Image (tube, helix red, strand yellow):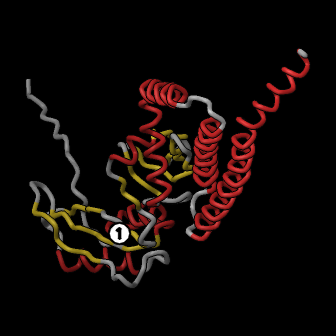
Amino acid sequence: MDLQKWIDKGFEIIIDFGPKVVGAIAIWIIGSWIIKSLIKGLRKTMEKRDYDESLKKFLLNLLGWVLKIVLIIVVLGTVGVETTSFAAILAAAGLAIGLALQGSLGNFAGGVLLMIFKPMKVGDLIEAQGELGVVKEIEIFTTKLTGLSNREIIIPNGALSNGNIINYTTEGTRRVDLVFGVGYDSDIKKTKEVLTKVLTSHPKVLKDPAPAVTVMELADSSINFAVRPWCNSEDYWDVYFDVTENTKEALDAAGIEIPYPHQVEIHKNE
């Protein structure tokens, strides 16, 4: 008699919950297939748009977990489990984690923006947050630069994305801004000829745009010339240092004085 009761009770449970369980299984199978297809399509879209590999993996994994959590909540609700409190717990946990990791989330958001809008790429020479260096690696939370003295510079992406970024590589060419002063006794025309020859004879100075030499300022003790050669971005420092050295040698050879402070000794007769 007791066995019959258990059998009847089992049939009641099957009748009551059977369709729910079958429905939950069906929802899980169909939902998993939809999530998989969605992730696959999104991955193809990201590959076509050349998303950064680290960003692509992170976003796909994040989206996958979020969709799976939603699917689990739907499945639990289908079989009759109360999901309101479960969702509330998840929301509270998410809020607590967000507050605890506020700075990190800001850096993460900055990293996402940098990888999507791409104001720079690995190998670019940039100036940002008071630092100058070549981009070594763009990560989710930080960006690494190699400084001119081979220092590793790590900048949080939050600050980087919210500040000014000067990219010296994007245009492919750069103008080298130099200033040289000569004495007031110097012939301006001859000085310009000497400086122009220094620029045009350098193999890494571009002919187009043409280099420029102009009188910039009549200073207290010198006539200052603005010297503006153009070069490929990767040749910037070669041109900068070579032109500086060659200019000194060329001005000396032409007998054109570069003013410098003089100390005059006064001997007092006793």
Residue at the front extreme of this rendering: 1
Which is more toward the observer, 109 or 194? Answer: 109
Secondary structure at numbered mark 1: strand
User: What's the residue at 55%, 40% (across, down)?
Assistant: 152
Indicate left or right for 72 with 22 as reference: left
User: What's the residue at 63%, 60% (across, down)?
Assistant: 38
Which is more toward the observer, 148 or 189? Answer: 148
Where does the image place residue 228, in percent across and percent down from the top left? 30, 71
Indicate left or right for 217 with 34 as reference: left
Tell me: residue 74, above or below residue 31.
above
Where does the image place residue 103, in percent across and percent down from the top left? 42, 31
Q: Which image quarter holds the C terminus? A: top left
Q: Which image quarter holds the N terminus? A: top right
Indicate left or right for 90 with 68 as reference: left
Residue at the top extreme of this rendering: 2
Residue 43 appears in which quarter of the rendering?
Answer: bottom right
User: What's the residue at 51%, 25% (across, down)?
Assistant: 85
Residue 221 appears in which quarter of the rendering?
Answer: bottom left
Q: Which residue is mark 1?
A: 175
Type of amino acid at the residue the image marks with label 1: Arg
